[in-house]
């Protein structure tokens, strides 16, 4: 089991003036992030010669865990689900693998079969246990299926128990579909897991599925009497990137649904008893535009422009939503809106200037992706990935000033972001709070062309 020494690295913090009159420039103080992953050629990866993707961090039982997918040396698509735990010592940080610590991960149901590099594994806690969810190839059906396992919390002899329903089907609801795009959340005494299943009928489609887990087992949750949450489950329509959130003890679901172009969908769950499965009246539609065509969302700034990657956060007792949406030049802009408290008459208020061409991007001529938000010491902070001046993608961060549409950049006051090496592309960024600290994790390109996992505690807005 490898344990590595690390060093501290300082990155600047500042702001940039957006090309939009609604934004004001403020120069914040400079933070000092503490890297808790190696800052050399190899990151947290099991091997420096392997590429990693879609990392995330999760606090459980007073410990910080990281999970990601990593492709083995030689390729072949045999991606392994890696899980590691931080030793908690910022002065001498080290991580220990709890996935068996060998080339073949014991988390994988079958480590000899492909796990897609876009598997985006998720960690979640429920009823005192730590769970991991991912998608993995199943050889009998020749499809990717949704898997879930429970950690035994034995760091000397780690093991992961299977809790998905079927060795062949996993949690998939359609026998001929591939599972993709996972999202999970724990809501009081239930563990919810969402994913999309791609059908290969002609034309193809992908539909959003949702299940809840209790000690009694898994329950499929429906909408409008159908087996999917998608607004339009018709062939040719695609649902992607589900995100689940708890707000005021209610489950909210957001996703992208492609109806010609990507529409942002949002629904709220209105049923306390999921053991019988939700149906028509158990969901509140928060995106339908009654004044427009039924297929379009009024959350989009422009329903005829492609939008994607929605995520929630709760701030000042209200639900906030962030996503990216293309402008008329097809450049994705970061968008933020706030939902009012009356779900019977939902209103989404733009917090990004509501300019048709400009979101809160550092440079509106550069494409943004992978947005997320967190509340840090009472401040609403948005993070995303944006192309830099030399083409290398940068991690950006901006703080909402709490007044109208004003945002202040807190990532360096320059064209580069908070990457470890700003000349290398960063992506697949996630952030969480742990023991009062802001923990960031992402993948970043190394000089050998692989993508390495980087992690740091940051002092933004501390």
Image (cartoon, rainbow, N blue to C red):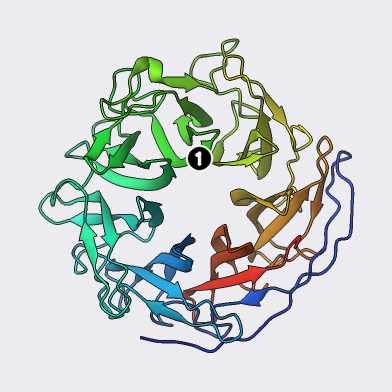
Work out which quarter of the rendered image holds the C terminus and state it: bottom right
Q: Residue pushed farthest bottom?
A: 5
In the orientation shown, which residue stands out farthest toward the left? 140
Position of 111 with respect to 245 (left or right) is: left
Residue 252: % across, % down: 49, 33
Q: What element carries label 1?
A: strand
Q: Which of 19 and 67 is in front in this view?
A: 67
The answer to whether 160 appears left or right of 300 in the picture is left
Residue 328 visible to the viewer: no
Which residue is found at the position 33% from the left and 76% from the top? 155
Report the quarter where the N terminus lies: bottom left
In front here: 39 or 339? 339
Q: Where is residue 75 in the image (x, y as percent from the top left)?
A: 31, 73
Count of numbered marks: 1
x%, y% of residue 70? 37, 70
Instruction: Tell me where residue 289 sits by quadrant.
Output: top right
Residue topped by disc 1: 245
Q: In this view, does 21 lie to the left or right of 88?
A: right
Residue 420 image-quadrant placement: bottom right
Give coordinates of residue 107: x percent, y percent: 27, 66
Give the vertical position of 367 relative to 329 (above or below).
Answer: below
Residue drawn at (76%, 53%), measured in percent from left and top?
362
Q: Which residue is drawn at 32% across and 59% down?
A: 116
Q: Nearer the viewer, residue 67 or 127?
A: 127
The answer to whether 175 is drawn above or below residue 446 in the figure is: above
Q: Which residue is drawn at 20% across and 62% down?
A: 109
Q: Point out the residue furthest to the top here.
A: 291
């Amino acid at each position: 089991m490898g344990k590595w020494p690390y060093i501290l690295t300082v990155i600047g913090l500042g702001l940039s003036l957006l090309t939009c009159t609604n934004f004001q420039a403020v120069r914040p103080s400079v933070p000092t992030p503490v890297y808790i992953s190696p800052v050399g050629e190899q990151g947290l990866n099991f091997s420096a010669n392997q590429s990693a993707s879609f990392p995330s961090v999760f606090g459980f039982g007073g410990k910080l865990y990281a999970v990601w997918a990593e492709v083995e040396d030689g390729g072949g698509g045999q991606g392994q689900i890696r899980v590691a735990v931080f030793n908690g010592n910022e002065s001498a940080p080290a991580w220990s693998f709890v996935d068996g610590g060998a080339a073949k991960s014991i988390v994988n149901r079958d480590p000899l079969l492909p796990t897609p590099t876009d598997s985006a594994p998720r960690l979640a806690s429920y009823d005192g246990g730590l769970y991991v969810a991912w998608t993995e190839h199943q050889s009998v059906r020749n499809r990717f299926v949704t898997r879930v396992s429970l950690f035994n919390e034995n760091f000397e002899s780690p093991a992961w128990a299977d809790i998905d329903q079927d060795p062949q089907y996993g949690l998939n609801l359609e026998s001929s579909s591939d599972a993709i795009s996972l999202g999970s959340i724990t809501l009081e005494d239930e563990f919810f897991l969402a994913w999309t299943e791609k059908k290969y009928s002609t034309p193809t489609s992908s539909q959003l599925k949702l299940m809840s887990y209790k000690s009694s087992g898994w329950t499929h949750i429906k909408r409008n009497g159908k087996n999917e949450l998608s607004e339009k489950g018709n062939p040719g329509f695609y649902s992607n990137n589900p995100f689940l959130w708890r707000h005021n003890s209610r489950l909210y679901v957001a996703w992208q649904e492609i109806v010609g172009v990507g529409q942002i969908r949002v629904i709220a769950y209105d049923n306390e008893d999921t053991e019988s499965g939700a149906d028509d009246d158990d969901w509140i539609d928060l995106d339908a535009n009654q004044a427009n065509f039924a297929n379009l969302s009024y959350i989009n700034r422009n329903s005829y422009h492609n939008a994607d990657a929605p995520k929630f956060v709760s701030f000042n007792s209200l639900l906030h939503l962030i996503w990216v949406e293309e402008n008329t030049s097809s450049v994705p802009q970061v968008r933020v809106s706030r939902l009012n408290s009356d779900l019977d008459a939902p209103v989404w208020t733009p917090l990004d200037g509501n300019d048709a061409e400009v979101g809160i991007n550092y440079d509106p001529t550069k494409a943004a992706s992978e947005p997320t938000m967190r509340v840090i010491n009472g401040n609403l902070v948005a993070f995303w990935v944006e192309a830099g001046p030399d083409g290398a993608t940068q991690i950006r961060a901006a703080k909402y000033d709490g007044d109208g549409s004003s945002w202040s950049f807190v990532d360096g006051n320059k064209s580069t972001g908070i990457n470890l090496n700003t000349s290398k592309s960063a992506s697949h960024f996630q952030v969480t709070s742990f023991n009062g600290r802001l923990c960031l994790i992402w993948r970043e390109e190394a000089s050998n062309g692989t993508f390495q996992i980087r992690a740091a505690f940051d002092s933004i807005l501390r």
